Image (spheres, rainbow, N blue to C red):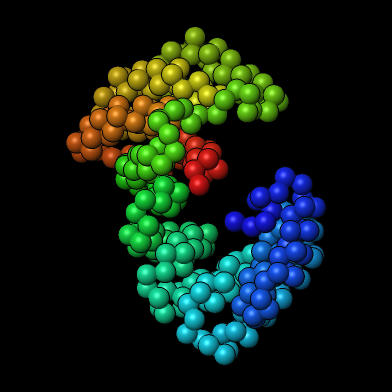
Amino acid sequence: MTAFDYCIDKKEALEAFERLSRMLPESMERQAKRSYHLGLTLDRLGRSDEAVAAYDRALALYEEVLQRNPREAKSWLGKGFVLQELGRTAEALAAYEEALRLDPDHRWAASNKAGVLAKLLRYREALTAYDYACQLQPENARLVLQKSCVLVDLGRYSEALGTLLQALRLHWRAASSPSSLLPLETEQQPILRQRAEKERAACQRRLRRHPDDRQTLYQQALLLSGLGRGEEALAVYERLALAVPGDPVPRCCQILLLALLGRLDEASERYEELRTLQQQPASADKHLRALFGPMFSRLLALIR
């Protein structure tokens, strides 16, 4: 967390860093860390050229520190942070791996390594890295949620649901009692909401002509969940599940929506039922990917 996070006014954030610069001891590592956080603040102010200059200075300082003491794990971690902000992702990964080699229990190096591997689309390696990171931070709901995202990217939807339920339990244990995490109508941009309502009306017209059109039913449920109308979406998925009892896809969708509505016990019961099915969702199922995607984006924004 930077000084930016404590200041409502953006100019106050920069002034805070200047005061901090005068107060902190002038060790090289302190200077590197300060330059990195200054870069983050400048980035958020939209001053990208100045931010890059701050990151470059931080990187030069970390490299000098590591020349003097290459066995300092926290300096490798700091170097990784800076490289990541500069978009040098493969080099950041190498820095995190070196930090972990020096200190295998370094939780931030482990979690950042996993995140970088996912960013590089190396999902199988990322999953292994997230497993290790979750061992070091078993109560970190966001980390467990990120692992669930990787399972979705691998098409392992049933496992992703189980991991998602675990993440939500951790989140609500630390935050408050379960409540709906679906988007509220007031949070949505009017133009997007109008477009979704227009598409939903088109779905309803198609369903009047072809009541059992599964593709249209899935689209309707997806639109309803995006509009925050989870109970209505659940009813559509229930209709789909009853039409083809052996199809795991509507069951997966129901579990996800129940969890997001705060009905975690029901979601867990349905998940245990799903696990007894021999058939699992196909890894290429477009509807599950379309449903999981925006929901994960929202959850990652909400769960810290």
Residue at image point 72% right, 45% down: 8
As displayed, is residue 177 above or below residue 37? above
Residue at image point 23% right, 35% down: 272
* Residue 231 coordinates in the image, percent (x, y): 43, 19
Quarter of the image for the N terminus: give it. bottom right
* Residue 180 coordinates in the image, percent (x, y): 46, 27
Instruction: Judge by depth and name the residue closer to the eye, 268 or 289.
Output: 268
Residue at image point 63% right, 18% down: 198
Lateral position of residue 239 relative to residue 27, left or right: left
As displayed, is residue 212 above or below residue 263? above
As displayed, is residue 135 above or below residue 70? above
As displayed, is residue 179 above or below residue 275? above
Lateral position of residue 234 relative to residue 79, left or right: left
Residue 69 in view of the camera: yes
Lateral position of residue 61 relative to residue 122, left or right: right
Residue 39 in view of the camera: no
* Residue 291 coordinates in the image, percent (x, y): 47, 35
**Among the 4 quarters of the image, the one containing residue 2:** bottom right
Q: Residue furthest bottom?
A: 68
Task: Report how many numbered discs are placed on residues in the image.
Answer: 0
* Residue 214 coordinates in the image, percent (x, y): 42, 23
Residue at image point 41% right, 47% down: 141
Instruction: Judge by depth and name the residue closer to the eye, 27 or 297.
Output: 27
Q: Residue furthest top?
A: 208
Instruction: Judge by depth and name the residue closer to the eye, 245 or 117.
Output: 117
